[in-house]
Image: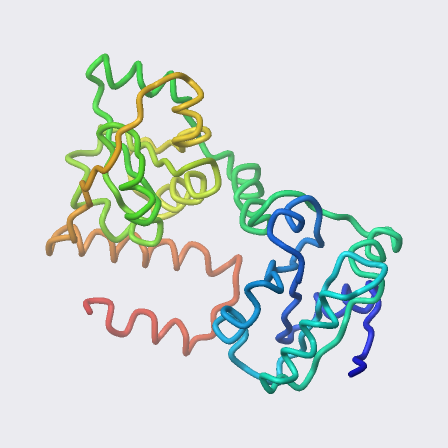
Amino acid sequence: MSYTLISPSQVRAVSVLDQEYAFLDMREQGVHSEGHPFFSVPLPLSRLELDIERLVPRKTVPLLLLDQGPELPLAQRAADILAGFGYTDIRLVDGGVQGWRDAGYELFSGVNVPSKAFGEFVEEAYETPHISAVALDEKVKNGEKIVILDSRPFPEFHRMSIPGGIDMPGAELVHRVFETIPDEETHIVVNCAGRTRSIIGAQSLINAGVPNKVSALKDGTMGWYLADLTLAYREDTVASPPGALAGQKSREAAHGHFLRSRHKFHYPQSAAHWFWLAEDQ
């Protein structure tokens, strides 16, 4: 079966429109990480039948399929499978990755590039404070008042963590922090495995107006290991849900940030009403 080709420039045009689309890289993850367009999502042909309906549940969404190029055997095979699954708008990126490069567009290496780029932007824009593994280790050994909050999901925390760390996944930080921090003099250090979630977690607490000193652990557990410091394994220390007083503080912090940020971002009045109508729930 033949499918519509879409040029790299047309893909770029679609990416800035306010509409739904799926830009799927049919190559294996390792090849994808060597170089890919910024917003392309790896969905190897070997995983297609397993993952497609979870990633793209709506069958009418435009699917932009990327191959290595200039020939498109993976994308062609994927298109046949997707058509059999009932997807109705399937397009192959003309020339694949090679065509993208030949058109003068940039390729990015690594994985999870958009989220990492967002973290770097946040750190640059807000000058998020950070602390090195060696400096943190020294402060802990000197008995300074430090609380280490691990912003990763529990399975990652349980696999390996900073000694003394408390698991508090990023979306839970503002919600749970006031139950965990004993006083305003305690230095809060947020870590992850590398950089991004440490930065976002630390800046979330700062933006919420948490009065404590807050820092992101530079390079996370990876930096701790590379500094020749000992990691902890199979820990299960998880932050407690907030009690009444801590819960009230977290709601006030979130509400305060909402009010402070309204001049930067547009929130419809109905949305504001919905957000805070039942703030005690």
| Residue nearest the viewer, comparing 188 with 98 | 98
The reply, left or right, for residue 53 in relation to residue 161 is right
Relative to 73, say whether 247 is above or below: above
Q: Quadrant of the C terminus?
A: bottom left
| Residue nearest the viewer, comparing 99 with 167 | 99
Number of callouts: 0
Residue in the picture at 79% in, 60% down:
96
Residue 30, x across and y down, in percent = 62, 47
Q: Quadrant of the N terminus?
A: bottom right
The reply, left or right, for residue 74 in relation to residue 192 is right
Residue 198, x across and y down, in percent = 41, 39
Which image quadrant is residue 41 in? bottom right
Residue in the picture at 55% in, 45% down:
116
Tell me the colour scheme of the image. rainbow
The reply, left or right, for residue 53 in relation to residue 101 is left
Outermost left residue: 244
Residue 174, x across and y down, in percent = 29, 50
Residue in the picture at 83% in, 51% down:
101
| Residue nearest the viewer, comparing 270 with 90 | 90
The reply, left or right, for residue 49 in relation to residue 36 is left
